[in-house]
Image (cartoon, coloured by chain):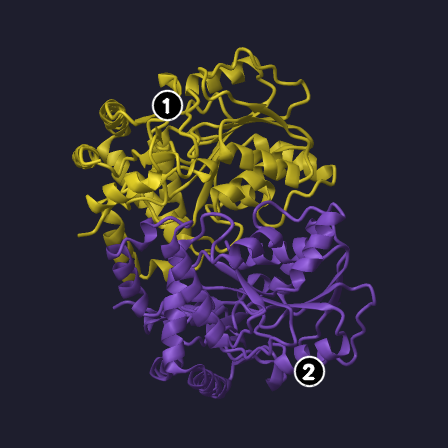
Chain colours: A purple, B yellow
Amino acid sequence: MAKTYFTVGPTELFPEVKQFLVEAIKEKIFSISHRSKEFEMINSQTVYELKKLLNIPEDFYIFYLGSATECMERIIQNLVEKRSFHFINGYFAGRFYNIAKQLGKKPYQNETNLKEKFSIDKIVIPNNTELICFTQNETSTGMAVNMKDIHKIKDKYPDKLIAIDVVSSIPYVNIDFKKIDCAFFSVQKGFGLPPGLGVIIIKKDCIEKTKLLKERNYNIGGYHNFITLAENAEKNQTAVTPNIPGIYLLGKICKMLNDRKIEIIRKETEEKAGLMYEYINRHTYIRPFIEHIENRSKTTLVFEVAINSNIIVDKIKRKGFIISRGYRDFKDTQIRIANFPVHKIADVERLLKAFNYL
Amino acid sequence: MAKTYFTVGPTELFPEVKQFLVEAIKEKIFSISHRSKEFEMINSQTVYELKKLLNIPEDFYIFYLGSATECMERIIQNLVEKRSFHFINGYFAGRFYNIAKQLGKKPYQNETNLKEKFSIDKIVIPNNTELICFTQNETSTGMAVNMKDIHKIKDKYPDKLIAIDVVSSIPYVNIDFKKIDCAFFSVQKGFGLPPGLGVIIIKKDCIEKTKLLKERNYNIGGYHNFITLAENAEKNQTAVTPNIPGIYLLGKICKMLNDRKIEIIRKETEEKAGLMYEYINRHTYIRPFIEHIENRSKTTLVFEVAINSNIIVDKIKRKGFIISRGYRDFKDTQIRIANFPVHKIADVERLLKAFNYL
């Protein structure tokens, strides 16, 4: 029997993906030119469904890139002259910070104490900061920043740009797009799709900053600079030949989720997360890594385990479920379990039963 | 009835793609972690089949990127300190040159006279050139540089690196990898796959140049710099979550082409190109754009037309075939027809019959 993936991404695909792909191949959608009217229609359909799903205002562009890591690189390259500020709550926040350094910027970092409740009140962001970067949901540690905290930052620093990595919390996370400038994700997590597509949601105004950087002779990159991306997005096109299957499937999945209603998906996500934390908590040697309930991710749950994680992952696998081990340094001492829209309540209940056999 | 795509890419998919995708979804291949042994096996299988197909030596890496345009950017960023040299035989060669300028380099360019036989003998490449760039097969103009000329360049300038864009000639083009350092392509042309994956084939030695650039504080990019890409390629991994469907399908198609024998595919490509040039030549108002037979592409054939290309494309479409119009400035005055391994001799014969009705 095929196993069910509860991994933090790539993960279980929506079962509908197969049919979407077969239909698209029959209709020869992956043969059409990315400069054709047909592609413009597919692209505008995806933009429409994604904006509807996440309540994204008109004054935002959707850019398609190769991965969330490329999103980080292009955001730094196109929005930062010298100073970005990074809240470091795990490995991927560190990656965002490292990329800023690799590109020759002088980023600030603030190391999050994962044992305390996350509070922005104590943190002073230097005046010369241009872009504040949050990894809203850290896939490596299971630490989630409450969106209210991020929205508060914009109130406190209205002149600074805010970029949020929502790779593993979207579409569950409820973003107020009036309070951020840029969000990005990849599709192989909460959208239950194959990997290979990164997406940036960006306020149109931000392009003015890119133009300024260009005027000042900063390297804003090749054809994935925000000026070229924006010019193409205006025509429902892309700067280069894109991952058309990825864009097509994202539109189809967003439409499906819109039909199912995002409020219901969000409610179910919270219900499933509640079940998981409550049930797994009862195990004597498994406990949530993040202590403060408010900062525990509801979409990528991370647990400390007192025996080698490999033993747990193997036993759960024999019951038909694939879960993730800890990330890098935490490989042996943690397990990670996804709770994405693709995972039904009944799946979660079956998974939790498997934990009985540990 | 579904139309047959003879467009220069994206183009007709190999009919086997559908079955490969359905099987992969059944096996949950797009759910596996890109850090798992299973992915390493898929990746090493693709590398094995691609290297076998193109006779790529052991001392070359295979890197996966988002598009051929990203390949251009990463090649310049990682192999050039100041000076690249570009033979400009069409729009995409110009794109490669423009990217070098965008990245703050000082590239040289040599405008190819498309009305003359291409000869490298008259061209002097300045001493301080670090990288010589060829668009071996120009999709925009149908101009192909004979591989013998490229191999001669390496004999003449053995100390300079050579990068070739083979986006729309691979796998037909027969490259002597002892005479080049780097080749790149995307999969939506000669490999008959959906778009979304760029591939760089690069001599391992080249990474020394990247390390030198890094030492000298040049910006070599984020996680798609050649040092990180090489470290991951050594482990059959990737720097970031890649387009796993693209990598998987490329391996499957390469295996299929290996079974069919590349020599036969190359012979058939020449035969089909011969049929097309001969037949279409007979039309009074359609003639090859490239005058010298040796420089006429065998994989992306470009013709000048005396009536608006739109009329021809429409008439051919009504007969069941999609062909491309000219590129940009040549949109109205040219047509472009692909001749890829996916196109069978019988398909070409049917297409040519459609030209009878013009």
The relative height of residue A101 versus residue B77 in the rendered view (above or below) is below
Residue B292 image offset from top left, x and y in percent: 39, 17
Chain hosting mark 1? B
Q: Nearer the viewer, residue B187 or B120?
A: B120
Q: Which of A86 and B100 is in front in this view?
A: B100
Point out the frontmost of discs 1 and 2.
1
Quadrant hosting residue B343:
top left
The relative height of residue B180 versus residue A303 in the rendered view (above or below) is above
Q: Which of B355 and A239 is in front in this view?
A: B355
- Seen at 33% across and 52% down, the residue is A30
Residue furthest right as drawn: A127
- Seen at 57% across and 61% down, the residue is A328
- Can residue B234 be seen from the camera position used here? no
Quadrant hosting residue B268:
top left
Horizontal side of residue B170 vs A75, given as left or right: left
Identify the mark at residue B296; answer none if there is no mark.
Answer: 1
Q: Which of A223 and B79 is in front in this view?
A: A223
Chain hosting mark 2? A
- Can residue A258 be seen from the camera position used here? yes
Amino acid marked by disc 1 = Arg
Does the CB distance between marks 1 and 2 fall below 8 Å? Answer: no
Residue A10 image offset from top left, x and y in percent: 43, 63
The residue wearing badge 2 is A117
Amino acid marked by disc 2 = Lys
Q: Is mark 2 on a helix, strand or loop?
A: loop
C-alpha separation, residue under disc 1 versus residue under disc 2: 67 Å
Residue A198 image offset from top left, x and y in percent: 51, 59
Residue furthest top as drawn: B121
Horizontal side of residue A265 vs B258, given as left or right: right
